[in-house]
Amino acid sequence: MAAGGVLSVEFPDGRRLEVDAGTTAREALARWDPEKASASLAALWNGKPIDLAAAVPGSGALAPLSFRDRAGREILQHSAAHLVAKGLVETIPGARPTVGPPTEEGFYYDFDVRPLTPADLDAVRAAMDHAVKERAPYRRREVSKEEAERLFAENPYKLRYIAEVPPGEPVSVYDTGSFTDLCRGPHVPDTGWLEGVHVLGFSSITPETPGSAPLQRIRGVGFPTRAELEQYLKVRAEAEARDHRAIGTRQDLFLFLDEAPGFPIWLPKGMVMVRELEKFVTEHLRAAGYSEIRTPLLFSQSVYETSGHWDHYRENMFLSMVEDRVFGWKPMNCPGSMLVFRSRARSYRELPLRLAEFAPLHRLEASGTLHGLTRVREFVQDDAHIFVTEEQIEPEIRVLLDWVRDAFSTLHLDWSYDLSTRPEKFLGEAAQWDRAEAILEKLLKESKVDYRIASGEGAFYGPKIDIHIRDSLGRPWQTGTIQLDYQIPQRFGLEYQGPDGQLHPPVVIHRTILGTWERFLGVFIEHCAGRFPPWLAPVQVRVLPLTEAHAPGARGFAEELAAAGLRAELAGSEDSLSKRVRNAELDRIPYVAVMGDREIADGSVSIRTRGAKGSRTMSRAEFVQFALDRVRRRSFDP
RNA sequence: GCCACUGUAGCUCAGUCGGCAGAGCGGCUGAUUCGUAAUCAGCAGGUCGGGGGUUCAAGUCCCUCCAGUGGCUCCA
């Protein structure tokens, strides 16, 4: 405590106040700004979070912490975790709480307890609601290590944490009603702050220490108000409604069979989309000077021994016996590309050599990790390997980042980059890494797109740029990646003859932009909720004859559309017009063309655009031009 | 792969205490010929995920396998 019993406290706006020693953080903040004080759930003293009920520890800087601050959010989530623990211990006496930290999304608490049931969760929720109404304070107590060991004698997990506290230091515990938990704190003042807390679910988790019994994890989210929680739950419900697995079934895009778990089956409509994406990407490849190759799906074990997959990736590979030799289904395209490069002498005049390959890749993903189209065992990447000299790295990657911008702008997706730098275990020279990282960072700065440095997360063979997209609900997904590789050319003994007549190893850039058709379409389906841009839509126009009498005219128009290169289909007259319009909306068809007496008479067509209320009439030629133009420009909206 | 949960018609789902397997949508047939988000009627459609067990009797209870879901782990 400060001498003289008076502390000098500085607030975020620069104001200073003298407060008596023993003044709580709450009181000090209230003297500074009562409004901000009442909105805060904890305080920051010299950058360290403390309880509002704690005495200001000394002279220094004091700031309020609200849910808007990251640290404040974590405190609320952490307090929410305590609330869950309190609820669970009340529900199942003898349950041993272990740890309950905040996460990006919310929080969780792990328990050593029998496997939970949904009924347990209901009971926990009820106990939590009750506690929130009680507005029970979070009371901090500092106890000796021995006292703490006595308090948590029944809980080996807590004893382990207590043992980690340096000797002589007090251990802090928090009492919430009759529930006491070992905790560093700080916490919100009382459980009344937690009305916006919601338990999402439970699961069993595998603890990191091998051999220990599984724990039960309860996950949740917390907001300062119920209204904010409702908003969050609304967004979640919206996300569920966009689930690509449901839309894929509804729109007949793809399916999975029990007989081929993790192997997507593309139905005709989904295949149209795959081909359109391929076309989109291939146009770029042509413009950017790529050549396309196709290499085998299976290679003998020796190829993977050379590439390093045999040592580093074998457990994720499908293997087949061919006569007496082991063949592996390729999990990546690089080995094939390397062999093509090596197949004859190469000159510096050929570089950059850009080899693209869209081949099916197989990865033996563990059964529990499979998920719709976003985690599968067989997929196709928009993959390419670019063989360059060190000087060519910069211009090549600049072109790639331009393509990223074009591609994701067209697809109406927001994207950002991660620059993953040298990991602890790396191959090659540190100086080479530094140069490469500097080039990549310079290019990222130039691109004016947000990027984050993922320190030490590079591959062992080189630094990389990972591309993340955010879908319309703000959820992040990794799609493409641009990786520099100094190692694989050496492993395969690649070289080219330079202008100096000497042989040099090329640098390889592995890169995919959309990633895989499968994952990309999975994300994209959710992004646009199944309302595809016309150029991707499996059916672009549905032609509806008003009555049977108009069917020949409608059929003629549908044929005209098809001849113009549009994907059109006819929907007969068995159902009422409004029923067929409704079905077209539900099928997310971009354009509905209705033909009745008026249209047949004057060569026009009545067009309804997806999502729009009314319709407009235009000449058939006009519509064909209009639709073709939208498709050609890859307009996002119909 | 680990843990929990789930699996009933093409889809979404109901099925009580173990006692005749249901609905809506979709499909088919017929009537209706309709002007921009659901016309009416009838019919067909099931190895209740597979296998085994308990029982007079199993969609329902038990075991096991498969698949899916949510997490965990993994994700060059």
Image (cartoon, grey):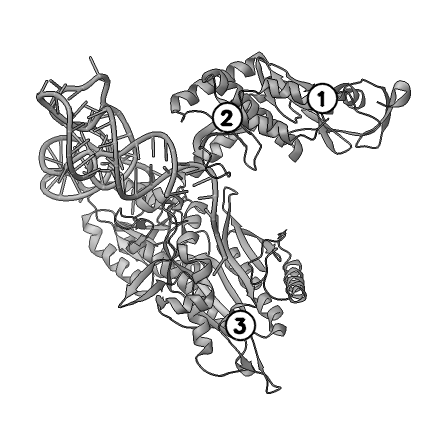
Question: The numbered mark 3 sits on a residue in which chain?
Answer: A
Mark 1 is surrounded, within 10 Å at the Cα level, by few (under 14), some (14 to 19) or many (20 or more) other residues, namely many
Amino acid type, mark 3: Gln
* Front of the two marks 1 and 2: 1
The residue indicated by pointer 1 is A52
- Judging from the image, what secondary structure is the residue with disc 1 in? loop
Mark 3 surroundings: few (<14), some (14-19) or many (≥20) residues within 10 A = some
Q: Quadrant of residue A140?
A: top right
**Circle on res. A490:** 3
Marks 1 and 2 sit apart, C-alpha to C-alpha, by 24 Å
First reached walking from the N terminus: tag 3 or tag 2? 2
Front in this rendered view, residue A634 or A485: A485
Q: Amino acid at mark 1?
A: Leu
> Toward the viewer: A552 or B65?
B65
- Tell which of A192 and A555 is nearer to you: A192
- Place of residue A63 in the rendered image (x, y in percent of width and height, measured from the top left): 76, 29
